[in-house]
Amino acid sequence: MMSSIPSAADGPDPVPPSPADGRGHRARRRVSDLLLCLALVALAFLWQGLAVPRLLALAAPALGAAAPWLVQGGSVAAATALLYVLTRLDRVAVTWEAHARNGRLDARLHAQQRELEELARGLIEVQESERRTLSRELHDDVGQAITAIKMGAASLAGEDEAGRAEIVAEIVALADQTIAKLRNLSMLLRPPQLDALGLEAALRGQAEALFRNARTALRLELQGPARRPPAAIELACFRIAQEALTNVLRHAGAGTVQVRLRADAHALALQVADDGRGFDPAQVHGLGLITMRERAQLLGGSFALHSAPGAGTRIEARLPLGA
């Protein structure tokens, strides 16, 4: 359990104090200075046997408004009583400061908890969206292709040699299309080349496949870390790049798109930039952008989007290699 009163050994305050907290701290310092002065007066009286009024008169500049009352009274009892009151005030000041610090910590913790809850809700939405996409692809494309293959095979019996050859050719073409569709669906679940070849090769293969027949020129500058990152980092980086490139292909109308991958001792940095039509980020809240940001943040990384109408778009993700 944390102590309610912090000490110097606690280290720096993790939550910056407000201006009001600064004023409270200065007031506490003034009270502490006055307390120290009175304590010195009391010690001098006990050790040297000097008169209290004389000592208090000497300390008058430091005592301020309290000096006339103490000098005139010259009472040890009055000095002792004031010393006790000021000691209690100092403890109250310490308690106030501790409460203020704890209040800031509580507010920070509540804000972080809300952020984590929002991330969790967003992740659930992303997962449900991906499941709906898979379900639709399987039903609309793969399911219909298999049905067509079945019907074509059933019709072979009533056809002559020429008719059977034509139907067989159609069945083979449908089978090839179905295999390609299933391969694409497997990419949505887990890109196999990521495990087999690593992040750089997987990014290169995915980018080249997406833009093979596009009018947008593709530029790749891929240089990952010397050692393979953790699997979760590789997958998040791949998915962010995949989503960003898909957005460029669908919406940007770009002449050029550039993918950069760099690594230092602490993090993996990904950048995808295009010279397309751009947009106002404040007006766009698509699921793809939310997904990219959450993939980075859930691993302790960061995500940034830079865009403006007519100025292209650039996304930047930084993922910690220690995750």
Image (cartoon, rainbow, N blue to C red):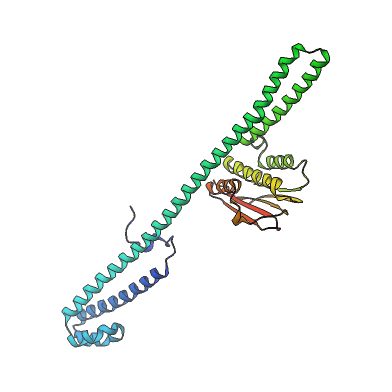
Question: Is residue 227 visible in the rendered structure shown here?
Answer: no
Q: How many marks?
A: 0
Left or right of 107? Residue 232 is right
> Residue 257's spot in the image, x, y percent?
73, 50
Extreme-right residue of the structure? 162
Q: Vertically, is 68 above or below 235?
A: below
Left or right of 309? Residue 217 is right
Nearest the eye: 266 or 14: 14
> Residue 26's spot in the image, x, y percent?
37, 74
Residue in the image at 57% along x and 41% along y = 232
Left or right of 291? Residue 50 is left
Q: Vertically, is 187 above or below 72?
A: above
> Residue 241's spot in the image, x, y percent?
65, 45
Residue in the image at 24% along x and 80% along y = 41
Extreme-front residue of the structure? 158
Question: Is residue 108 visible in the rendered structure shown here?
Answer: yes
Q: Vertically, is 235 above or below 58?
A: above
Residue in the image at 70% along x and 21% along y = 149
Q: Vertically, is 85 above or below 146?
A: below
> Residue 170's spot in the image, x, y percent?
77, 23
Left or right of 184? Residue 14 is left
